[in-house]
Image (cartoon, rainbow, N blue to C red):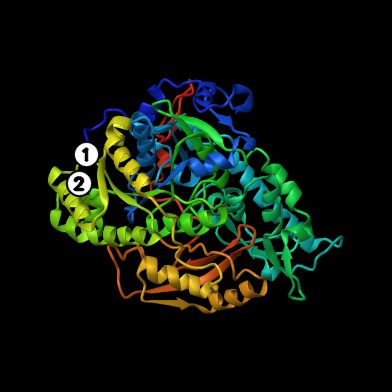
Amino acid sequence: MATLHKSDLEIAQSASLKHIKDIAASIGIDQEDIEMYGNFKAKLPLRLIDAAKVDNSNLILVTAMTPTPAGEGKTTTSIGLSEGLNKIGKKTCVVLREPSLGPVFGMKGGAAGGGYSQVVPMEDINLHFTGDFAAVEKANNLLAALIDNNIQSKTNNLGIDPRTVEWKRVMDMNDRSLRDMVSGMGGKPGGIMRQTGFNITAASEIMAILCLATDINDLKDKIGNIYVGDSYEGNAIFARDLNAEGAMALLLKDAIKPNLVQTLEGNPAIIHGGPFANIAQGTNTVIATKMGMSLSEYVVTEAGFGADLGAEKFLDIKCGYSGLSPKAIVLVSTIRALKYHGGQQLADLKTPDTVALVRGLANLERHVNNIKTFNIPGVVSVNKFVSDTQEEIDVVIKWCEKMGIKVAVCEGWEKGGSGSVQLAEQVVEAVDSCTSTYKPVYNWDDSVQEKIEAVARKIYGASDVEFLPKAKQNLRKIERIGMNDKPICIAKTQYSFSDDPKALGKPAKFTLTVREIEIAAGAGFSIPITGNMLRMPGLPGVPAAEGMDIDENGKITGLS
């Protein structure tokens, strides 16, 4: 991969964009059927989803090996693959998540791809976009306000025990100071004091619900099922008991509609929803995926972080609820990540080191074997970087051939669709060879404890699972409110198969520690929280925000 002289932002700013009505027309949508947000963004009405067309479309899931802190280019690969498929004559749409402002202004950057594999307008997508995150935030915080109001009110008081309320407010920013706090201070005018805090918007149950809802009525039902806490008598209280679902759905009336944009090469892209994969289900909305499948022959979508998180949750949660099943899984790998998991220091990853590379293949091996257990054909995509040597790439290719899995070198970052044709051809072969639906890791009828143990042992490679006292208490509550027959969404570090972010490679004989289990009754899953995972991230020592600016002409710099 040659060095690009332009930054991602400069490439995006220099692109000549098509009007969004022309992008819509390319996938058979009349201008009257889109709600335009300027010239380059539009909302799509849910009536465009066609169940028969969904059944005849080919869904491709892009996931990755365990990443380095910078990520391995999963979104870039997804966009490049979509461009490549279109180049070989396959009518394809890429369907992605919306970026969260927390990572944009923090360390990881945006989520619009990179190089010549981007979705545009990049600045809008990475910033406020069409306001979906703001709507999720407002709906979440409306419920928080209704809960606190009911606790202190003498009218229609439900007798909510403040000590049992775990619903937090949310904000789309990395702000560690908001994790834990006391609300209701200021005496009688301030309400009832209680301990609470903030989560990041992407970790909100409202975001999870939006991503699993099928229509506005289903959205309201799911919101109504949100578990709020218990009464003083020990009875479960739900959002429907507060009559909250109607007003909350009202705030989400536009956010439920998928967003249509375009790739740098003028192909359609749908971007909708944005849960993280280490603390939520990590994939775009069911509605957006089915929309893409209604409008194209192939849909490329992604699931966040490594396959142990995003892919497992995509299959066991999203596919379990939606009835979808991918026909191929693309596993993104990089030379730098393989060397990182083989023991090379982060600062030295640009230095060739085949010894570390070979050691790091153990991490890729576990992911490859996991994909095989899902019963879906897989393709390893080597996302090529400037510092990669041909010798290192050849090691990975020969290893994949020995493992019996398809492999392709992807140069989408440098060359866009033309650099992704080899991957596209391998993916089409994998799709054509698919004769089955995915195999889940566990049965929903298993107990929550059994489901956690199944994922820990089969996917992570844990030898044991320890449930701390609060987690055991949560298990009893889950059984009490009837959540035992729902899937699980494990919150775990993205940097390791274990719950220790420093345990790189292929850790063995480790114990997964479940600290507590949160209840997401509205979304329809429980959230076992492992290790030191937090649902409100913090900023790094030098946040990306410090390098961003806008001039008097509205030109943005420093965004990535």
Q: Is residue 31 visible?
A: yes
Sequence order check: which comes first, mark 1 or mark 2?
Answer: 2
Q: Amino acid at mark 2?
A: Lys
Q: Position of residue 238 (x, y in %)?
A: 72, 62
Furthest residue to the right?
155
Q: Is residue 342 visible?
A: no
Question: Which quarter of the rendering shows the C terminus?
Answer: top left
Dot 2 surroundings within 10 Å: few (below 14), some, or many (20 or more)?
Answer: some
Q: Position of residue 117 (x, y in %)?
A: 36, 34
Which residue is labeled 1 in the image? Answer: 386
Q: Residue at x 22, y 53 (%)?
A: 400
Vertically, is 317 above or below 3? below
Using the numbered discs, state the Cα–Cα distance from disc 1 to disc 2 in whole angstroms: 8 Å
Vertically, is 308 above or below 32? below
Q: Amino acid at mark 1?
A: Val
Pointers 1 and 2 in contact (C-beta within 8 Å)? yes
Q: How many marks?
A: 2
Q: Would residue 233 appear left or right of 74 to someone viewing this image? A: right
Question: Which quarter of the rendering shows the N terminus?
Answer: top left
Q: Position of residue 2 (x, y in %)?
A: 21, 33
- At mark 2, the secondary structure is loop
Which residue is labeled 2 in the image? Answer: 350
- At mark 1, the secondary structure is loop
Dividing the picture into quadrants, the one containing residue 465 is bottom left
Disc number for residue 295: none
Dot 1 surroundings within 10 Å: few (below 14), some, or many (20 or more)?
Answer: few
Question: As rendered, which of 57 and 24 lies closer to the eye?
Answer: 57
Question: As rendered, which of 219 and 468 lies closer to the eye?
Answer: 219
Dividing the picture into quadrants, the one containing residue 456 is bottom left
Q: Position of residue 340 (x, y in %)?
A: 25, 56
Question: As rendered, which of 458 and 153 lies closer to the eye?
Answer: 458
Q: Residue at x 49, y 74 (%)?
A: 450
